[in-house]
Amino acid sequence: MLAGLLANPGGSVGLNFPVPGVDEVIRASGRATMSKEPKLLAGMAVSGKLPKLAIVVALDEVFFHCGKALKRAGLWGPAREIDRTDFPSYAQVIHKRRPHEPLEKIEKFIADNYRNELY
């Protein structure tokens, strides 16, 4: 979304808000812009840390999407959970695009980022 927003500020966006265990999904569409407005960012502080940037969506439409597709897919059922080792890690995906960087360095960066930059 961020790359599209950088290329087309004020462009159209679509958002889905699935909630595990709930079949219906809230869908929203509108136009997105980025903001570094201090007052806006101040309202998003978590544990005293401010975000660096906000994506602001001017909503055009918000509605429920029925749960038929999710019910058919059984998406939230425990039988649908995958073994995390069956899917490449975030670090492995980055390493494929940056093979000159050691995988261990990428894994360390990600772990440190999650620990220190989450909020």
Image (cartoon, grey):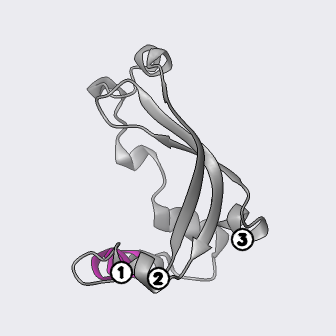
Q: Nearer the viewer, mark 3 or mark 1?
A: 1
Q: Is residue 11 magenta?
A: no
**Residue at screen point 38% across, 49% down:** 85
Q: Which residue is mark 2?
A: 52
Q: Is residue 79 left or right of residue 104?
A: left
Which residue, given by chain and number where applicable, does mark 3 sit on? Answer: 6
Identified by mark 2, the residue type is Lys
Identify whether 79 is placed above or below 53: above
Element at label 3: helix
Q: Amino acid at mark 1?
A: Ala
Q: Earlier in the sequence, mark 3 or mark 1?
A: 3
Relative vertical location of residue 10 with respect to residue 108 in this rendering, above or below: above
Q: Which mark is residue 8?
A: none
The quadrant of the rendering that contains the C terminus is bottom left
> Type of residue at label 3?
Leu
Q: Secondary structure at mark 1?
A: helix
Tag shown at residue 42: 1
Report the side of 104 relative to 28 (left or right). left
The residue stretch that appears in magenta: 108-119
Residue 43, given in percent of the width and then of the height, sits at 34, 74
Q: Is residue 72 above or below residue 63?
A: above
Cα separation, mark 2 vs mark 3, equals: 15 Å
Query: Which of the two discs, 2 and 3, labels the residue nearer the N terminus?
Result: 3
